[in-house]
Amino acid sequence: MAHYSHYPNYDVLSLINEWDDHTKEIVLKRLGPFPEPQLLEEKEVKMLRLIAKHLCYDNRDDIIDWILYYVDQRLKSNIGENQRKSTTPEEKVLIREGVKAIDKATQTKYGKTFISAEISEQFEILAALQLGSAPLIPEWATIPQQDLFDKLLDMMIGAYYSHPTVWSEIGYGGPAYPRGYYRIELGWTDPWEPRRPGAAKK
Amino acid sequence: MENKDPLQHNCDHYDGHRYSDMKCRKYGDQEVDVCIVGVGAAGGVLAYELSKAGLQVVGIEAGPFWNPQTDFASDELHSYSLAWQDTRLSDGNDALKFGHNNSGRGVGGGTVHFTAVFYRFHENDFRVKTIDGVAEDWPISYYDLEPYYQKIENDIKVSGPKSLPWGTFQGPYPYPVREPLSANSQIFQEGCEIRGIRSSVTPLAILSAPFDGRPPCTNRGFCNEGCIPNAKFSTLIQHVPKAIQQGAEILTDSMVTSILTDKKGKVTGVEFVHDGQIYRQLARVVIVSAFAIETPRLLLNSATAQYPFGLANRSGLVGKNLMVHSGHDVFAKFDEEIRLYKGTPVMAFTQDFYASDPSRGFVRGYSLNAHGNRPVALAKNLAVDGGYWGKGLREVMLDFNFYGQVSLVGEVLPREENAVSLSNEKDEYGLPRPLIHFSYSENDNRLIKDAIQKANEILSARGGKPAFVIPDTGHVMGTCRMGIDPENSVVNGFCQSHDIPNLFICDSSVFVTSSGSNPTETIMAIAARTADYLANKMRQGPLA
Ligand SMILES: Cc1cc2nc3c(=O)[nH]c(=O)nc-3n(C[C@H](O)[C@H](O)[C@H](O)COP(=O)(O)OP(=O)(O)OC[C@H]3O[C@@H](n4cnc5c(N)ncnc54)[C@H](O)[C@@H]3O)c2cc1C
Ligand code: SF4
């Protein structure tokens, strides 16, 4: 998975001394090291790791570690999940039972576990979930496929795009407190902002 | 612990640090004049105005008393903690998303992480039935609110243009517009100009110059994450500290679980839970200001033998006519870098499509706001609501800086079947979780289609290539609407319930129609007007 970046020379973490302490602490924690998962079991972690790589289209283990840590923390916490359809199980059940169902659906279709399936087969199963057309197994009656897919996406994509390495690649200025921006108009950047190689210094 | 806050919160729970000790309650078992449930946009204004009028006021708030300097962070994931995250059950063809995009929890409510776009409603917004033959008219007119709009704008020093081409109020605002404009707002205004559409710089509850010990905005763009420097208004930093100075008490981390009534059917106070313990606050008047979902939930859950269908519910309309704003986000890709994350999210807008236009095939209209965005919010919306993931999502996001965005604030018409009711599922307090049902009507869908087309025209005119549209909503309203007829509304024009004279409902739930404008200035103007009425009435004696 090769990724182009418009900003190959930019590292948002080089600005970290300009951030307030609270934000700094929060962002640095995303770099690890992470404690062992507190809720998820080994097999769940393995499967979720593969799923995260597909959904985020990224293979870098350090970033995926952060995503898994985030998912584990979320499932462990008792804070609500904002909203859920009245017919959908709560997110803990949705994800944990959902992972089992994904494994079963993969076995039904390919005769192998999700973990041992080919990358393209894993991809096919996930793509089918999004459309609600995964191989038919009774579990889908209580684990709505699309809700499962959306929940995984919501958590994993949220964590992925909060990782400073990803910020650097997409050219996001990151936390800008207390400094703020002076040059916000079209074509203008503050001297410390990400710039494309060769872009005019305005 | 030493108090290093620039703001002083001299309440029982906050003197530079927070007590969790309920023994420090100011009034204890005593009956106070007014108890306010929920200290958000409306509750904050009520607490300030009523305590300034000399009344004994206790505000009870489910969430914490935030300290912007130590609790907020310039980070999207972290800012979810500012939202009402408790699970709400959400069904319907267009099931709503809750949490960070529309609900606050903690002193300040939604204003803590709102975008601070600050519009007055137009005169026509209050008379939809008369003008368009749909929905209902409000029992009050624009002119009833006008002095309160003016007061609120002046109290918080709204920064806005000298003149506006739309609406009844056309400026000027107390503080000048914020300069410079963000790139996204610039291209929006240029696109509008090319298409012959009028546009303006946006009035914002964000300072363009110092005020009240608070600094002007530094354009970091983290308004939806909570403004650390306090340049953005919220009732947390504006009304509540002033209410406390006037003697109001704010009890935080305290969830009101029911409203109490006596044998005569009047309300006598509330019951609330703090740290697992149940407490009571007795009051001559109770005002429910808990947001358009929690307010009907609390009223329905407070049912008694005398009021078997919940309090203030003779009309059967508590929870009904729930409205949101359709808030689709329209994106186009540019050859130049726009950098959607810089500057406050909204700095330019148009209301050229606000009024009904029979040629469009639907009634009512919308505002279009040039709208900023940040990586987590954009990527999550693209994924969950736009269907992007894997390689496709990664590619869009690598070009993050090249997208421009326009978001609509579309009027949604009230319908009884869009409603909040009580589900069979219980939450941590043993209360039934709210069950919300929402579907757009044909009129809503036509309006959305038209608005998306107009947004794309503006972006394309300026050289953007239309890229994607993400369905979204914002601003929850209705559910306890005001009106003249007790059979057809829940409260009167002063937010007093028709059924129980000492029970008031004052927040976004009293809205009759949604308009095409962001609602918070109107919520606050209604709260200020209600406070005036209530203070006068209470001077005259008990509310009959
Ligand atoms: C991300 C975002 C952007 C927004 N942008 C804008 C904008 O640009 N312009 C605009 O006009 N509006 C905007 N809004 C909307 C605005 O925030 C709301 O319209 C406004 O806050 C609603 O006011 P309210 O008083 O009805 O409720 P809230 O401000 O939500 O206050 C309700 C309070 O009641 C508390 N509460 C609830 N139940 C209980 C209970 N049982 N016991 C005790 N306390 C309870 C809650 O914790 C909350 O603090 C935005 C909102 C969000 C979240
Ligand atoms: S952009 Fe301005 S108003 Fe918004 S958070 Fe930053 S300083 Fe506050």
Image (cartoon, rainbow, N blue to C red):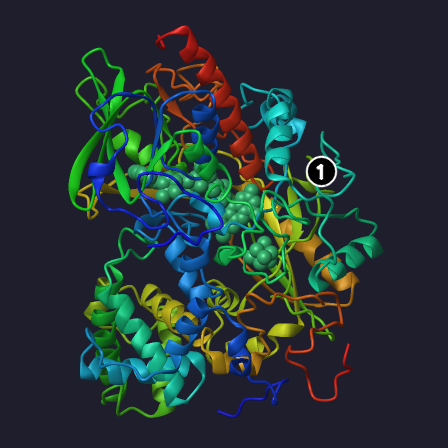
Front residue of B266 and B420: B266
Q: Is residue B465 above or below residue B316?
A: below
- The residue drawn where x is 30% and y is 29% is B299
- Compared across the picture, whether B191 is left or right of B131 comes to right
- Compared across the picture, whether B271 is left or right of B544 comes to left
Q: Position of residue A15 (x, y in %)?
A: 55, 79
- Answer above or below: position of B277 versus A72: above
Residue B254, image quadrant: top left
Q: Is residue B440 visible?
A: no
Tell me the amino acid under the disc marked 1: Tyr
Q: Position of residue A186 (x, y in %)?
A: 75, 68
* Extreme residue in the front direction: B2
Q: Residues within 10 Å of mark 1 (few under 14, many from 20)?
A: many
Q: Residue at x 18, y 79 (%)?
A: A41
Residue B523 appears at what percent x and percent y? 52, 33
Task: Specify whether B94 is left or right of B296.
Answer: right
Q: Nearer the viewer, residue B292 or B485?
A: B292
Secondary element at image label 1: loop
Quadrant the N terminus of chain B occupies: bottom left
Image coords of residue B464 (percent x, y):
73, 67
Q: Which residue is mark 1?
A: B173
Eyeballing the image, is B104 above or below B172?
A: below
* Callout 1: chain: B
Q: Quadrant of the C terminus of chain B?
A: top left
Asked if ligand 1 lies within 8 A of label 1, the reply is no
- Residue B78 visible within the image: yes
Near-viewer residue (B482 or B234): B234
Specify the quarter for ligand 2: bottom right
